[in-house]
């Protein structure tokens, strides 16, 4: 498990306290609950976890709290992408010092005119700046959100240059042809998929597993996908119910609040706005997942 992220990993939501800080106790409880349902690991401060809304110090403090709560470091990954390369270096060094190895790296975002060579330079600057053989980085491809795609040539070149330090790639493009292109270009990488309806076909095509947000809500259904059960239609319907809303994160948190009876889950960081109630969507997910759980 330490060489690359493989199997069933969750892109965890980030619960907030009333003052907007990370609610460490609620997060630790959420992680333990997920582990009890067959989850192998969690990635904190990814897209589902509102990662770009938290600075490096907040992320490090949360990792420290999770370790203190007894969450094993090999079961934690962290979103480490920032527009500033120096921030990515500082965060990665800090979490490696705490015993983590898995860091998901977005390409620096905001500038949409960057070249493949520039993207490779940026990743190389992070890895060279960290200068630690313990690193097992996963490149994070989610261009519809970040605005910056990772070309297959860049992934291949980085693996060739850095070996196991570039351990994996998470493809959250939602385009299965893109997943297959990564597999063909860099078969040595552990390539996980973020689009839940693609999990079974991705694993059949040599994928390493999933890091996905829907597992916060329907971990049993995601597990069925990993196990190759014929639940793709239900997974697609469940995913559409959450993703095809104005705010995936606010919707997901509203459903978590309804599932747990804990209104604290409704809180989001600006510029997001909280939804008042996720009960109707919870009932929809219940109807979709009940056959898979029975």
Image: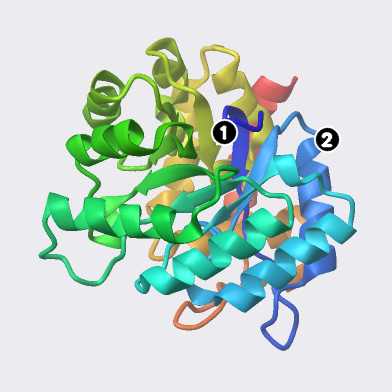
Give the x, y percent position of residue 254. Answer: 62, 63
Q: Which mark is residue 225?
A: none
Residue 137 coordinates in the image, percent (x, y): 48, 44
| Residue visible at 55% across and 32% down in the picture | 4
Looking at the picture, tell me which residue is in the foreground, 266 or 175.
Answer: 175
Q: Residue at 55% across / 21% down in the picture?
A: 225
In the rendered structure, the answer to whether residue 77 lies left or right of residue 46 reads right
Q: Is residue 59 above or below residue 150?
A: below
Of the residues under marks 1 and 2, which one precedes in the sequence? 1
Instruction: Give the CA distance from mark 1 to mark 2.
Output: 19 Å
Give the image location of residue 71, x and y in percent: 82, 48
Q: Residues within 10 Å of mark 2 (few under 14, many from 20)?
A: few
Q: Which residue is mark 2?
A: 36
Expressed as whole percent of the image width and height from the top left, the position of residue 41 reads 68, 39
Instruction: From the viewer's perspective, tell me whether residue 73 is left or right of residue 195.
Output: right
Left or right, 83 with respect to 95, comes to left
Residue 155 visible in the current orientation: yes
| Residue at the image position 25 percent from the left and 46 percent from the top | 150
Q: Residue at x 55, y 50 (%)?
A: 132
**Dividing the image into 4 quarters, which one contains the N terminus?**
top right
| Label 1 with label 2: CB-CB less than 8 Å | no
């Amino acid at each position: 498990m330490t060489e690359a992220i493989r199997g069933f990993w969750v892109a965890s939501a980030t619960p907030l306290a009333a003052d907007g800080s990370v609610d460490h106790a609620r997060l630790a409880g959420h992680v333990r609950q997920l582990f009890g349902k067959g989850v192998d690991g969690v990635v904190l401060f990814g897209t589902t976890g509102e990662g770009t809304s938290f600075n490096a110090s907040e992320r490090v403090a949360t990792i420290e709290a999770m370790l203190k709560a007894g969450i094993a470091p090999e079961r934690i990954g962290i979103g480490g992408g920032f527009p500033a390369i120096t921030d990515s270096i500082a965060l990665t060094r800090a979490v490696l010092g705490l015993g983590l190895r898995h860091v998901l790296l977005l390409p620096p975002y905001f500038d949409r005119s960057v070249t493949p060579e520039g993207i490779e330079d940026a990743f190389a600057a992070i890895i060279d700046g960290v200068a630690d053989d313990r690193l097992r980085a996963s490149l994070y491809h989610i261009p519809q959100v970040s605005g910056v795609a990772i070309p297959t040539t860049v992934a291949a070149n980085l693996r060739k240059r850095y070996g196991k330090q570039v351990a994996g790639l998470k493809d959250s493009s939602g385009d299965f042809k893109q997943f297959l292109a990564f597999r063909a270009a860099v078969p040595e990488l552990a390539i996980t998929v973020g689009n839940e309806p693609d999990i079974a076909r991705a694993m059949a095509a040599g994928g390493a597993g999933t890091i996905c947000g829907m597992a916060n809500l329907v971990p049993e259904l995601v597990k069925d996908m990993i196990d190759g059960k014929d639940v793709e239609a239900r997974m697609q319907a469940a995913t559409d119910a959450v993703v095809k809303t104005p705010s995936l994160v606010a919707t997901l948190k509203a459903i978590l609040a309804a599932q747990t009876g804990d209104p604290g889950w409704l809180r989001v960081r600006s510029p997001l706005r909280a939804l008042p109630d996720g009960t109707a969507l919870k009932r929809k997910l219940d109807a979709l997942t009940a056959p898979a759980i029975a």
